[in-house]
Image (cartoon, grey):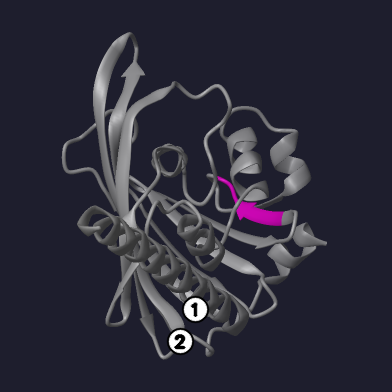
Amino acid sequence: MILKKLLTAATLAALTSSVMAADAKEELTKAAKALGEKGYSWKSTSERPGGGGGRGGGAQEGKVDKDGTVYLTSTFRDNKTEAYIKGEKFAYTNQDGQWESAADAENAEGPGRFRALMYRNYKAPAAQAQEIAGLMKDLKKEGDAYSGELTTEGAKTLMSFRGGRRGGDNAPEITGAKGTAKFWVKDGVLSKYQYSVQGKREFNGEERDLDRTTTVEFKDVGMTKLEIPEAAKKKLS
């Protein structure tokens, strides 16, 4: 009888935990969708506490109009690139600061082709947050914050993210992947999120540790509007 009561209590606790996690995920998804519908500005930073091979941390800033058009600036070392993305169309600045189109990028060699892949598969931060919520193993709510562990596959997916896009199918296999994510919500709208991922990957025949923390913060929610330069508009048409 005692064992039966213990099992029943354990089952109820598990069910309650599952329901609470589902409710938290639904609330978080709604908050991320609400952000995407309003237009917003954001800044994203990535840090690699332990190095971990590959490219170092970088920064992105951008704006999203309520119609979904994205303005993105990416900085790597001393190089800055601007881009406007609208659906499958995009325009970006080359190394000389001139605006190029999707067709220009796809017909280019080297960095141009890389940009074509990046911008065509780009997901704005509000949409990224919704996807990350779906990669969580569990999700708990504490005050206005939601946090939990990522699934193994979820951690692998986020390790393959490069500025809003996933890595290619030929990327080296990641082992020992794990990670956590946390989201902050204010007045029913997502205001910030952060995820940390760790694992191992082979670089040039040597296994290296990966460790990256990415933080995305939002501002000017509902007040952000885009003014696209004429040169960029022509490349978007």
User: Split into 4 quadrants, where in the image is the C terminus?
Assistant: bottom right
Residue at horizontal 52%, vertical 68%?
126
Asked whether the beta carbons under mark 2 and mark 1 sit within 8 Å of each other, the answer is yes
Read off the magenta span.
90-94
Q: Residue furthest front?
A: 1
Q: Residues within 10 Å of mark 2 (few under 14, many from 20)?
A: some
Label number found at residue 188: 2
Where residue 184 sits, quadrant-wise, is bottom left
Location of residue 95 in the rendering, given as x and y in whole percent from the top left corner: 53, 44
Alpha carbon distance from label 2 to label 1: 5 Å
Tell me the residue that label 1 is attached to.
Answer: 31
Residue 216 visible, this angle: no
Location of residue 100 in the rendering, given as x and y in whole percent from the top left corner: 69, 50
Q: Secondary structure at mark 2?
A: loop
Residue 42, placed above or below residue 128: below
Mark 2 residue type: Gly
Location of residue 91 in the rendering, given as x and y in whole percent from the top left corner: 68, 56
Pick the residue in front: 61 or 109: 61
Q: Residue furthest left?
A: 50
Mark 1 residue type: Ala
Q: Residue furthest right?
A: 237
